[in-house]
Amino acid sequence: MKDIGNIFKEKREEIGIKEEEAAKDLEITIPQLENLEDGNINAFKDIFFLKELIKKYATYLNVDAEEIMDEFNDFVFDFTSRIPVEEIEQKVKELEKQNEKETRNKISSPYTRKQVRKAKLQPVYLFSIITIILVCLTFIFLNLVLDNKKQENINKIGSEYINEFAK
């Protein structure tokens, strides 16, 4: 990792970019940039952030990003392959137990708890919807009946006038 950091530092100095300028352009802090250039992997908690930062910095300095990433991946593989499998399994079990305890002992308020909405219609809502539909249909039916009666009345009155004029 120190080799990658040295490549970055030498290239940055060769181009004439100050640490402050590079940190601002990469949207990171100056200590993060210094740790990257020093090859201090322990300063970064998230390996994925570090990997993206290396890609971003390589592109920024116009260094072959693929070659740098290959070197970084080799470093990570060498670093992680030294960890015994039993130690990894033990750590995974510890993390699972810790997560289990946290979820079991977690106290939550109904106001902060995530609520899962069910796509199920409540009977009250279903009854309300059916009632509204029936009321609408009743109004439509009454309107049609009243219109027909009005039309019949108009026709009757019209025919009476016609009959009176015809006499």
Image: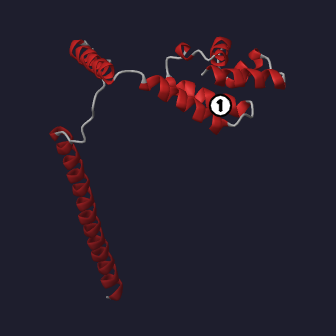
Q: Is residue 110 something one can see in this rendering? A: no
Amino acid type at image mark 1: Lys
- The N terminus is located in which quarter? top right
Q: Position of residue 59 (x, y in %)?
A: 70, 34
Q: Secondary structure at mark 1?
A: helix
Which residue appears at 24% of the width and 48% of the height? 132
Note whether 34 is above or below 63 in the view shown.
Answer: above
- The C terminus is located in which quarter? bottom left
Q: Position of residue 8 (x, y in %)?
A: 71, 24
Q: Quadrant of residue 5?
A: top right
Front position in the image: 114 or 74: 74
Note whether 33 is above or below 155 in the view shown.
Answer: above
Left or right for 102, reference 9: left
Q: Quadrant of residue 55?
A: top right
Which residue appears at 48% of the width and 29% of the height? 77
Which residue appears at 42% of the width and 26% of the height? 81
Front position in the image: 126 or 87: 87
Front position in the image: 79 or 108: 79
Q: Quadrant of residue 26?
A: top right
Instruction: Check disc 1 and report the residue beneath it.
Output: 56
Mark 1 is surrounded, within 10 Å at the Cα level, by few (under 14), some (14 to 19) or many (20 or more) other residues, namely some
Q: Is residue 47 something one can see in this rendering? A: yes
Left or right for 67, reference 124: right
Left or right for 55, reference 61: left
Q: Position of residue 42 (x, y in %)?
A: 52, 14
Q: Position of residue 36 (x, y in %)?
A: 63, 18
Left or right for 159, reference 9: left
Number of numbered discs overlaid on the protein picture: 1
